[in-house]
Amino acid sequence: MMSGTFCQSFLRASLSLLCTIGLIFVMTEFRYSRRKCFLIIFFFFVAAMTINGIILYAAGLDVLFRYFLFTTTLPCVILLAVLAKDDIFKAQFNFWTQINLFFAIVILSYYGTQALGGGFYTELLLRLLLYGGVFLLYTRYLRKPFRLFAKSLETGWILISFVPALFCTVIISLVLFPTIFYERPQVLPTLGLVYLTMFGVYAVIFITFQRSYELTSARREAEFLGLQINLQKRQFDTQQQKMEVIRMYRHDMRHHIGIIIAFLQDGHPEKAEAYSRQIQSMIDETSYYQFCENYLVNTLVSLYTDLAMTKGITICSDLSIPRELFVEDTDLCVIFSNALENALNACSKLPASDERSIDLICRKYPDKLVIEISNSFNGQAEFNEEGLPVSHDEHHGIGTQSIAFIVKKYSGILHYKTENRLFTLQILLNH
């Protein structure tokens, strides 16, 4: 093979591989930092192109296409499975979609060059323009809904991941076998029909996902509305009880004052002080809590604070949460209600003579929300391979999974730790 032809083929292959990897990178949510993943993918690209260059130089483009599955495609599948935060089926749906687009761009750029009467640089420019158009389409219109579906919908991906893989099998068989596509122009109508069918199937998948997401969101909103109504009712009942107690205290206040005066007149100031403290404690129990500006969080923490007091458990709250937050109310409700419920249950299992307390800290930063909840516990904790606490009680453990789902939705960090009979939950949510 002449050196000029080799260089042109190598540049075409390098450009196509680099752009395809770039599209995969754009649509993927990684488990590591994007900088680290970028470096790993860059070294993979260099290694793959070195191997492909050797095959191209020694055996030609036709042979390279036929061995591309083993030199690049399968290693890329494995690498994506390791780096991607998405499960393997979501990652593979993304991967095979980009491979199908790779073949489409190769075919379009080749025949576009033929139609324009251009040469190597025309074909290279066409590929760049086509990849650039796809990149803009992804970043402006497709990445956000795809990432939303990937985070919100957990079912159906096993079956759907096979759709682009099956189309890829058909496309490869038409493009490469028995000879490469540009030697068989009669295969073009069939390829066009396959791609039209593929895009039609993708449109159906998108519409199905969109409707499924809307139904899921509507169901969650309905559940949340019911929960809000229940919270409002409990809050109203609590306030009514406190108002009734306050009314009784006001009615009896002159009697309390009379008792205190009597203690003082009889020369028992210590009894007057003790009685005053008792009255003060009773009045404090009727106080309205104001932990933060966020109404939902304030309501939840208030309810659990009242519940903890009835069980002899102390809750110390240090919250800095504004009225408006990037986290949805439904997600806040899931996190705080489940976390506080679990903390309360753990404290309730301790003897009354032990220290039973819950510390709640929450901070809002420009693009993050940090939550830390620590509670006393019996010192016995078991975690699964994902680092989530395991409960052997029936119907328990679901709340922990719900919290993990919400954290994943916001590409956050979830961490549990135990130290000195203190169980701590740490959550970081990203905007």
Image: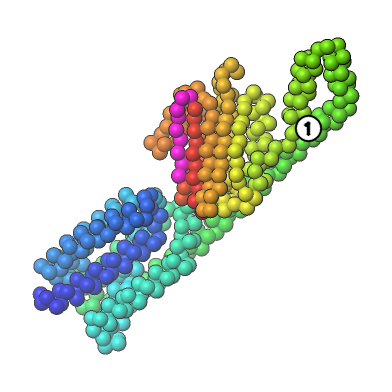
On screen, residue 285 versus residue 291, left or right, reads right
Q: Is residue 400 magenta?
A: no
Of residues 397 and 292, which is closer to you in this image? 292
Residue type at mark 1 is Lys
Q: Position of residue 139 (x, y in %)?
A: 44, 66
Point 39% across, 62% down: residue: 26
Point 46% across, 54% down: residue: 150
Q: Is residue 305 above or below residue 77?
A: above
Q: Is residue 393 visible?
A: yes
For mark 1, give the secondary structure.
Answer: helix
Q: Position of residue 362 (x, y in %)?
A: 56, 42
Q: Is residue 417 magenta?
A: yes
Point 67% across, 27% down: residue: 309
Of residues 57 and 423, which is closer to you in this image? 423
Screen quadrant of the N terminus:
bottom left
Q: How is the image coloured?
A: rainbow
Of residues 148 and 32, which is closer to you in this image? 32
Quadrant of res 280 = top right
Is the stretch drawn in magenta largely helix, strand or loop?
A: strand
Q: Which residue is mark 1?
A: 242
On screen, residue 120 versus residue 248, left or right, reads left
Q: Is residue 73 visible?
A: no
Q: Position of residue 318 (x, y in %)?
A: 60, 38
Point out the stretch of residues depicted in magenta. 413-421
On screen, residue 30 versus residue 207, left or right, reads left
